[in-house]
Image (cartoon, helix red, strand yellow):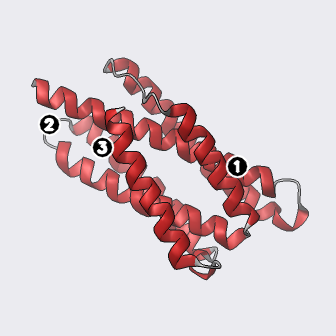
């Protein structure tokens, strides 16, 4: 593998690890709002299932970081607070806003994984296959959120754009820092 490829793989692993770390934090923040209310028990259970999947992704990236000797982003503590805060705020706005958050985040992430798969499928087929599987999981979360009323959230267009902007910014920053 060339130095360029090693550098690019390191960026991918760093940003994907950060993304999964943030996703776990978002779901935890949302569950903190929903889990103790009988009226929101169903969404809390959905969020717990999605968090568990994201945790599996995070665990896989933990292993890949070690295997490829890549440091995680230095911004992990910030992404943890930001993710948890985003989860809490969207949950406080209601179930549909929580779903809108999931839909926006997963839209960005599934596209991100798709681009990475296309970029490395010939040079890193095993890693590409892992990313492709994770992309499918993210698509399932996105569809769950849409079915849950994401597009009916108050201020959906603005909320979605803001969250997507934040995701794109976090991706760019986490690749480097």
Residue depicted at 52% across the width and 75% down the height: 158
Residue at the image position 19 percent from the left and 26 percent from the top? 6
Q: Which residue is mark 3?
A: 129
| Residue nearer the viewer, 83 or 129 | 83
Side (left or right) of 169 relative to 151? left
Circle 3 — which element? Answer: helix
How many labels sit on residues?
3
Residue 55 at x, y = what percent? 57, 39
First in sequence, mark 3 or 2: give its number: 2
CA–CA distance in space, label 1 to label 3: 30 Å
Q: Residue at x 31, y 21 (%)?
A: 68
Q: Which mark is residue 29?
A: 1
Where residue 41 sits, quadrant-wise, is bottom right
Q: Which mark is residue 123?
A: 2
Q: Is residue 84 above or below residue 104?
A: above
Camera-side residue of 92 and 46: 92
Quick one: label 3, few (<14), some, or many (20+) residues within 10 Å?
Answer: some
Can you give x and y, in whole percent of width and height, for residue 66 in the image? 39, 18
What is the crowding at mark 1: few (fewer than 14 residues within 10 Å), some, or many (at least 20)?
Answer: many
> In the image, is residue 32 above or below residue 6?
below
Mark 1 falls on what kind of element? helix
What quarter of the picture does the N terminus occupy?
A: top left
Taking 168 as reference, is 23 left or right? Answer: right
Quarter holding the C terminus is top left
Mark toward the start of the polypeptide (2 vs 1):
1
């Amino acid at each position: 593998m060339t130095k360029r490829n090693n550098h690019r793989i390191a960026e991918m692993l760093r940003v994907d690890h950060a993304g999964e770390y943030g996703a776990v934090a978002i779901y935890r923040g949302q569950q903190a709002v929903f889990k103790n209310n009988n009226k929101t028990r169903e969404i809390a259970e959905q969020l717990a299932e999605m968090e568990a999947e994201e945790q599996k992704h995070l665990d896989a990236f933990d292993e890949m970081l070690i295997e490829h000797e890549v440091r995680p982003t230095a911004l992990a503590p910030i992404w943890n607070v930001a993710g948890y805060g985003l989860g809490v705020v969207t949950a406080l706005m209601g179930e549909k806003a929580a779903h809108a958050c999931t839909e926006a985040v997963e839209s960005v992430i599934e596209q991100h994984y798709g681009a990475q798969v296309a970029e490395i499928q010939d040079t890193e087929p095993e890693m590409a296959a892992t990313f492709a599987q994770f992309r499918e999981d993210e698509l399932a979360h996105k569809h769950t959120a849409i079915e849950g009323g994401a597009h009916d959230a108050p201020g959906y267009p603005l909320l979605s754009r803001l969250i997507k902007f934040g995701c794109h910014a976090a991706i760019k920053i986490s690749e480097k820092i």
